[in-house]
Amino acid sequence: MATPLADSIQRQDITLVADDGYALSAIRYSASGEAKGNLIMAGATGVQQRFYRRFAEHAARQGFNVLTLDYRGVGQSKPAELKGFQMAYLDWAFQDLAAAVDLLRQQALPLYWVGHSFGGHAIGLLPNHHALTACYTVGSGAGWSGWMSRTEGWKIRFMWKFVLPLIVARKGYMAWSLLGMGDDLPLGVYNDWKRWCKNPYYYFDDPEMAHLRGLYAEVKTPCVFATSVDDPWAPPRSRDAFVKAMVNAPLTLLDLQPPPDGQPYGHMGYFRESAQPLWDEMLDWLQSIPAHTR
């Protein structure tokens, strides 16, 4: 059932079913007036779709149909018991986000993508990325602590080596919420993420993932990869390391400066309400890309 928001935006809770049959919780926000395009909001690791509500509402007011979703194992797409739940980290792209693309591509509208952290990584993993008109991502980097500041890198290495292994051994999954850092994550996500974050070029350095370079080389969609100079986890040099695999996509790399009179971006501030000027820049850029470039 569609639910009207205070400013007349229609929000509908839907069930999105991936190709492997997994049911995902998603929310569809209908554009105010005539729709300019469809937009998928691809979130970060361990971040529930509700975090992106204000951005989704803002984009809907600007004329976009917006879809948000909780990846499997997260938020409203989490099983009753996370311990023992089997999945791989990249299922979020190969299955969950691919299902979002398949749903929205059915309409004769440009299909836009906004990604946050993992949501930027996912572009090159999508089996149907050719359906996207344009992509704008923020805070997407290679995940290696060596790209971070010395202090942040030490904290991250300590977490991976000492703190998280103890939590996972006790709980059977990555109980990240105990650290106040995000939603709890399945064991498969923890194992993959930990392994890849040891590498300067993330999963591109993993011999078992050698085929991914070929997948990313196939992407030809215009993309912006923006990151703030104050992002502790995905500073510009981390972003630069990651996008080296996107050899055929028209890329624009932006180093964002935190607003001088507002809250810093950090890694999560891109989608806090104070970042509305950035949201407008995202939406303006997406609309500037002609749909025929797909």
Image (tube, rainbow, N blue to C red):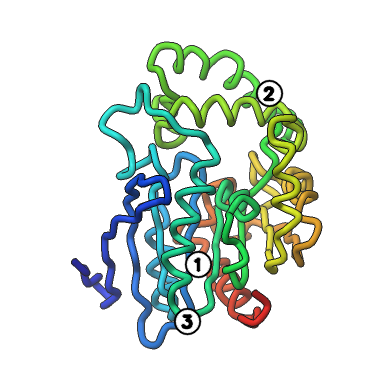
In the rendered image, the vertical position of residue 213 relative to residue 251, given as above or below: above
Report, in whole angstroms, how far the alpha carbon at label 2 lies from the one at label 3. Answer: 49 Å
Report, in whole angstroms, how far the alpha carbon at label 2 lies from the one at label 1. Answer: 32 Å
> Foreground residue, 94 or 154?
94
- Residue 71 position by quadrant: top left
Q: Residue at x 66, y 30 (%)?
A: 197
Q: Are marks 2 and 1 in contact (CB under 8 Å)?
A: no
- From the viewer's perspective, is the residue at label 2 or at label 3 nearer? 3
In the rendered image, the vertical position of residue 253 relative to residue 165, given as above or below: below
Q: Give the amino acid at mark 2.
A: Trp
> Foreground residue, 247 or 209?
209
Percent x, y of residue 16:
34, 56
The mark found on residue 276 in the picture is 1
Q: Give the amino acid at mark 1.
A: Gln
Percent x, y of residue 139:
62, 50
Horizontal side of 20 relative to 6 (left or right) equals: right
Residue under label 3: 108
Residue under label 2: 154
Secondary element type, mark 2 = helix
Q: Count residues near mark 2 (Cα–Cα under 10 Å), then give few for <14, some for 14-19, many for 20+.
A: few
